[in-house]
Image: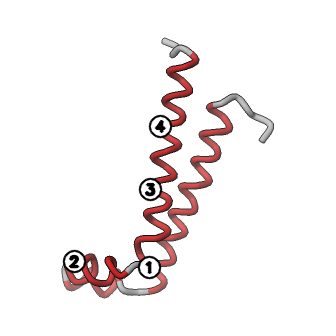
Amino acid sequence: MKLPRAAHIAVVLLITFYLCAAGWFCVLAPWTRYWAARVVPGAPIWLSAWLDLPALRGALSGFGVLHFAVAASWLNRGLGREDA
C-alpha cells in the first residue's frame, strides 16, 4: 500500500525531526553540567567511570553527528531529490 504524497512527506519530516533532535541530544548532552551532576553519579559504579571519560563523550557526540547525516539522507530521499 502506497501512502498519499502528503502523508509520505509528513512521515519523512517526522522521522527527520526525530533524528535531528536525537542528534542534538547526543552531541550536546555529554558535555553539559547536567551530565556531570545527574547522569554520571546516578549510574551504577562500573558504568559511571565510563560515562565520565572524554573518549566516550566524544563517541556519543560522533553518534549524534551520524544522526544528522541519516536525517539529511532521509530528507533528500523522502522529498524526491536523489541527486543530492
- Image-quadrant location for residue 62: bottom right
Q: Residue furthest front?
A: 33
Q: Is residue 16 above or below residue 7?
A: below
Q: Is residue 51 above or below residue 28?
A: below
**Crowding near the residue tagged with mark 2, few <14, some 14–19, many ≥20 C-alpha atoms within 10 Å:** few
Residue type marked 3: Ala
Residue 22 image offset from top left, x and y in percent:
44, 56
User: Residue at image x 46%, y 54%?
Assistant: 21
Q: Disc 3 and disc 2: Cα gap in Å?
A: 21 Å
Instruction: Please name the residue that numbered disc 4 is placed on.
Output: 14
Residue 63 image offset from top left, x and y in percent:
51, 64
- Please give the label number shown on residue 22: 3
Dot 3 or dot 4, earlier in sequence: 4
Dot 2 or dot 4, earlier in sequence: 4
Residue type marked 1: Trp
Dot 3 or dot 1, earlier in sequence: 3
- Badge 3 marks a residue whose secondary structure is helix
Q: Disc 1 and disc 4: Cα gap in Å?
A: 27 Å
User: Residue at image x 19%, y 78%?
Assistant: 42
Which quarter of the figure is the C terminus placed in? top right
Dot 1 or dot 4, earlier in sequence: 4
Instruction: Please name the residue that numbered disc 2 is placed on.
Output: 43
81 relative to 73 in the view: left or right = right
Residue 5 image offset from top left, x and y in percent:
58, 17
Residue type marked 4: Leu
Dot 1 or dot 2, earlier in sequence: 1
Q: Is residue 15 above or below residue 49?
A: above
Instruction: Please name the residue that numbered disc 1 is placed on.
Output: 31
